[in-house]
Image (cartoon, grey):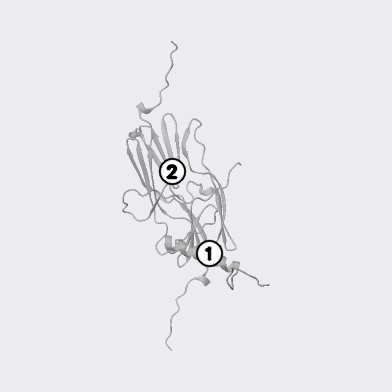
C-alpha cells in the first residue's frame, strides 16, 4: 500500500520550526534594523546589556525606587535583581484622572553573556536608571596578538 | 503584603508631532493625575531624565511636559542585548481647569516628575446652596 504524504523529503517538525524562527528574525531585522530586534523575557525590569574592554554593564529603568529597597546578587553567571516599587498613597480626598504608574515587587534573573568577577561588581542608581557594572576576569578580555615576521 | 508583581511593559511611542531636531525616539511617560479642590497633581515616570532636563510648556489649559534623557550608554560601550528602547519623553494634556501659573511647583527625583498645578481662583468649585423657597 503506497503511503501518500504531502511532506517533502527530509521534512521534520524541528527543522521547520527553526526555519520559521529564522525567517521571523529576518523579518524583524528588516523592519527595525540590525541589532535592534528586541528580546523580551516578560519579566520586570527589562534590561539592556552592553560592554567595553573591561566591564559588562546591565541597565534597567526603575524610576522612583528607593535604592535601599533593591537587592542585587551575582550568582553562578546570573545577575539577580530584586526589589520593590512603592507608590505612597495620596491624601484621601483626591480623585484620579489617570493612574498608569504601577507599584509592586520584582525578581529578575539575568543570564550574563560572559563570566564575571563576582568580587568586582558595582551598582549605581541615577535618575531612575540602575546600572550594574561587572568586571570581566582577565582571561576573557580581548588581547591584541602581534604578528611576528619570521 | 498585598503587593503584586510588576509586569514589564513596552514603552509607548509618542505620536509624531512637528519635526524634532534631536534624533531618536520619543515616548509617552506613564502618569498619575489626581485632583483636589485646590490643585491638580501630575506624577510622571521619566527614567533617565536629569532634573535640569525637564521642560514644561503651559498655555491656558494646555500642558506639555518633555524630558531629555542623558546618553543611555557611555562612549566606547558596545550593545550586547536590548530589551527596552531609550529616548526622550513627551506628553500633552488638556487640563480641565485654569492653572495659576505663578504657583506651579515641580520636582524631579529618581526619574519621577511631580508637578503641582494649583487652580486659579475662578476655577475652584463652589458649593452652591439651594435655598428652600
Q: Give me the residue at 51% from left, 46% from top.
A: A66
How far across and down, in percent of the image, does residue A87 sit? 51, 41
Residue A149: quadrant of the picture: bottom left
Q: Give me the residue at 47% from left, 35% from top.
A: A96
What SS does tag 2 mark?
A: strand
Note whether A125 is above or below A3 in the view shown: above
Can residue B108 be seen in this snapshot? yes
Tell me whether circle 2 and circle 1 mark residues in contact (CB < 8 Å): no
How far across and down, in percent of the image, does residue A106 sit? 56, 50
Give the residue at mark 2: B44
Answer left or right for B92 relative to A117.
Answer: left
Look at discs 2 and 1 and give the one toward the viewer. 1
Give the residue at mark 1: A21
Q: Nearer the viewer, residue B90 or A13?
A: A13
How far across and down, in percent of the image, does residue B25 sit? 39, 54
Answer left or right for A70 relative to B66.
Answer: right
Disc 1 is attached to a residue of which chain?
Answer: A
Q: Residues within 10 Å of mark 1 (few under 14, many from 20)?
A: few
Q: Residues within 10 Å of mark 2 (few under 14, many from 20)?
A: many
Amino acid at each position: 500500500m503506497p503511503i501518500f504524504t504531502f511532506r517533502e523529503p527530509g521534512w521534520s517538525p524541528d527543522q521547520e520550526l527553526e526555519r520559521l524562527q529564522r525567517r521571523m528574525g529576518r523579518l524583524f531585522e528588516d523592519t527595525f534594523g540590525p541589532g535592534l530586534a528586541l528580546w523580551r523575557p516578560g519579566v520586570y525590569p527589562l534590561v539592556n546589556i552592553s560592554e567595553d574592554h573591561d566591564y559588562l554593564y546591565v541597565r534597567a529603568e526603575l524610576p522612583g525606587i528607593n535604592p535601599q529597597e533593591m537587592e542585587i546578587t551575582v550568582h553562578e553567571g546570573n545577575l539577580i535583581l530584586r526589589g520593590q516599587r512603592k507608590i505612597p498613597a495620596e491624601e484621601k480626598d483626591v480623585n484620579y484622572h489617570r493612574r498608569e504608574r504601577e507599584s509592586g515587587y520584582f525578581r529578575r534573573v539575568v543570564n550574563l553573556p560572559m563570566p564575571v568577577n563576582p568580587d568586582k561588581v558595582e551598582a549605581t542608581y541615577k535618575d531612575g536608571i540602575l546600572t550594574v557594572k561587572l568586571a570581566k576576569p582577565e582571561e576573557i578580555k580581548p588581547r591584541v596578538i602581534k604578528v611576528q615576521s619570521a | 503584603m498585598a503587593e503584586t508583581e510588576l509586569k514589564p511593559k513596552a514603552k509607548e511611542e509618542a505620536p509624531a508631532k512637528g519635526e524634532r531636531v534631536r534624533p531618536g525616539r520619543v515616548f509617552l511617560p506613564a502618569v498619575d493625575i489626581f485632583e483636589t479642590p485646590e490643585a491638580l497633581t501630575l506624577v510622571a515616570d521619566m527614567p533617565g531624565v536629569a532634573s535640569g532636563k525637564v521642560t514644561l510648556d503651559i498655555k491656558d489649559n494646555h500642558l506639555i511636559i518633555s524630558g531629555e534623557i542623558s546618553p543611555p550608554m557611555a562612549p566606547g560601550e558596545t550593545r550586547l542585548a536590548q530589551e527596552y528602547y531609550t529616548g526622550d519623553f513627551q506628553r500633552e494634556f488638556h487640563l480641565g481647569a485654569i492653572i495659576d501659573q505663578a504657583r506651579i511647583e515641580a520636582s524631579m527625583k529618581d526619574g519621577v516628575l511631580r508637578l503641582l498645578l494649583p487652580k486659579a481662583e475662578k476655577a475652584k468649585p463652589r458649593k452652591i446652596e439651594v435655598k428652600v423657597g
